[in-house]
Amino acid sequence: MIDNVVPDGGHRKRPSGFRNTLIIGSVGVLSAGLVLVGMSTTANAASTLGASAQQSGRYFGTAISTAHLGDSQYTTIANAEFNMVTPENEMKIDATEPNQGQFNFTNGDRVFNWARQNGKRVRGHTLAWHSQQPGWMQSLSGSALRNAMINHINGVMAHYRGNIYAWDVVNEAFADGSSGGRRSSNLQSTGNDWIEVAFRTARAADPNAKLCYNDYNTDNWTAAKTQGVFRMVQDFKQRGVPIDCVGFQSHFNGNSPYPSNYRTTLSSFANLGVDVAITELDIQGGSATTYANVVNDCLAVARCVGITTWGVRDSDSWLGAGASPLLFDSGGNKKPAYTAVLNALNASPTVSPTPTTSPSPSTSPSPSTTFRLRNEGAGRCVDSPNSATANGTLFQIFDCHTNPNQRFTYSAGKRLEILGKCLDSPTGAGSGTRVQLWDCHTGTNQQWNFNTNGTVTNGANNLCLAVTATTNTSPVTIATCNGSANQRWTMA
Ligand code: XIL
């Protein structure tokens, strides 16, 4: 009925003529379902940054710091407005490997868990960088440092394997100024191939994370530094070095102003076949016009997947509150720049039918609204074999059709009902367990959450609904979440 298998980082185009109604919670899920079955909905501007970005299939994120997680004003704003999280310092090298070979994820996990518990995805930041290295790494060189870098990437990525949307694998490796070359650093001194070694290591360590190169002062298309990074990414793509995305920090100030060719920069990189993202946005002085320009430039580039501001309130900024660089003032009030950003996001054409996160119990969709659960990777639908209704019947995927054994309703208790029974993750199930049909009840193992990235997670174990293969009759399981196409579902 609808062809919306998306390549990684792509955006599903909604049929033109439909405007999105974006309502938080599973009402949003219902609305997506209604659109998919062809009923029009009324245009509604979303009222938060994350929800409005989601309308065009993008995210709106923020840096989160453990320093503020006890501040309810901060967490309230961050939770309401943003749907992507970057730990500001907590996953950096000095935080995660303070002593060589001894990893510490205490604060990284605090930010990660806050994000995950609030239904947000996480950008990992950062694995290989000349700055914020622990003392032991600063004093290493040569092959000892190269091996330490590899070991660090493996150690950190193993801990978060399958749970990070994108990693800034390498940060700030290029020099400022007119050279267009690499920054001198202890990592650079290990050999010019250190960046590609980092990316190859990262791909093997977590094949499901997008791998990004991230830098600042790469916004002006004609700058030597921008061109230097561009040539590296071009070279990596030509030689098959794994790279999926380029992050533009975009710390704009008087010395590094927003450039009028910013959109050209974003689109030129995207044309190399990578996602682009604005990863650490702040604008000294907080110009609403400049903020709107940045947002509009991202919206104009299909592979600009999202925007992250480097903090929530001005008082949280690494630049100090006096710089007034963010979207909320130090009292937590929305600034004119906030309104400019929200308006720009809401003016964008709406595209994504991805189910929205339902962080809280939601109102019940009409029982008469049925939908199929179509797996994006397989292009097939969850199916009760031969319309079996016995408890314990194991679900499969099969070519999508219109019979009741593929028809679900999403009930008030977040249950997925079919054939008078419910989709059930067996009690105590671990990754790889097949899901089954069972008498409906109120247990969490029959509760399913629709996430912004298209995954569907079980309320008892937080594992993701998945398929193990794409052919007819392949099993439907729950599995450790990795966000890949075999774990993404469309209500079709
Ligand atoms: C900054 C943090 O915001 C500060 O708290 C910390 O003291 C220094 O690092 N580029 C990056 C970020 O990639 O990691 C930096 O974050 C800002 C510049």
Image (tube, rainbow, N blue to C red):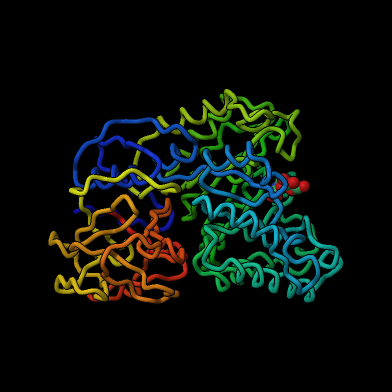
Q: Is residue 134 left or right of residue 360?
A: right
Q: Is residue 190 left or right of residue 158?
A: right
219 relative to 164, above or below = above
User: Which quadrant, please, contains the N terminus?
Assistant: bottom left
Residue 416: x percent and y percent?
Answer: 29, 58
Name the residue at 57% across, 23% down: 336
Residue 61 occupies quadrant = top right
Q: Nearer the viewer, residue 189 or 91?
A: 91
Count of numbered tags: 0
Residue 206: x percent and y percent?
Answer: 55, 69
Q: Is residue 45 left or right of residue 216?
A: left
Residue 266: x percent and y percent?
Answer: 52, 43
Q: Nearer the viewer, residue 4 or 79?
A: 79
Q: Is residue 30 left or right of residue 295?
A: left
Is any part of residue 221 visible from this angle?
A: no
Name the residue at 69% across, 50% down: 66
Name the residue at 37% across, 38% down: 23
225 relative to 349, above or below = below
Residue 379: x percent and y percent?
Answer: 27, 63
Q: Nearer the viewer, residue 27 or 31?
A: 27
